[in-house]
Image (spheres, rainbow, N blue to C red):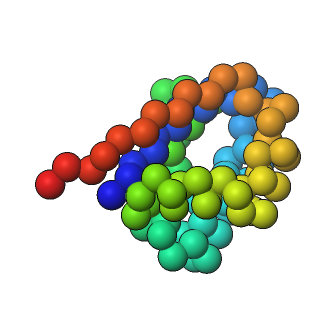
Amino acid sequence: MFVVTVTFVIKPQHIAEFQAAMIENARTSVEIEPSCRRFDVCRDPKNPSVTFLYEIYDDAEAFEAHKATSHFKSFDALGASWIASKEVKTWILSG
């Protein structure tokens, strides 16, 4: 399994709209992408501008396919100006 973690820092004035759009993107990913096994959207309880994603795909190719979907591209374009910073890491699930 291929794991992707993303940490976003969201501009304060866009937190609510980012969260709503990200949750919809996650829901759609799990519902229509057969190789997207998990997509959790987590928010730091002490700092609401920080959002952490935990995504599991069958493999790296499935993640690349995710980035080519229309729902990802729409979210990416919509939310680009809301993001102060973004850090993406990839992992291989052990065990």
Residue 63 percent coordinates (x, y): 53, 55
Q: Where is 31 relative to 53, above or below? A: below
Residue, far front: 61
Residue at the extreme left of the image, as rendered:
95
From the viewer's perspective, is residue 16 above or below residue 63? above
Is 57 left, or right, of 11 in this rendering? left
Q: Is residue 56 visible?
A: no
> Would residue 91 be seen by someone viewing this image from the given angle?
yes
Q: Which is nearer the eye, 84 or 47?
A: 84
- In this image, 87 relative to 4: left or right? right
Q: Residue at x 33, y 58 (%)?
A: 1
Residue at 50% x, 45% y: name it: 53
In the rendered image, the residue lying farthest to the top is 84
Residue 95 position in % (x across, y down): 14, 54
Q: How many marks?
A: 0
Who's the residue at 85% across and 46% down the image? 78
* Image coordinates for residue 42, horizontal then vertical, percent: 49, 45
Q: Is residue 42 above or below residue 11?
A: below
- Between 16 and 93, the one nearer to me in the picture: 93
At 73% from the left and 30% from the top, the residue drawn is 83
Identify the image quadrant of residue 71: bottom right
Looking at the image, residue 8 sits to the left or right of residue 18; the answer is left
Find residue 43 and report its horizontal and vertical position in percent.
Answer: 52, 40
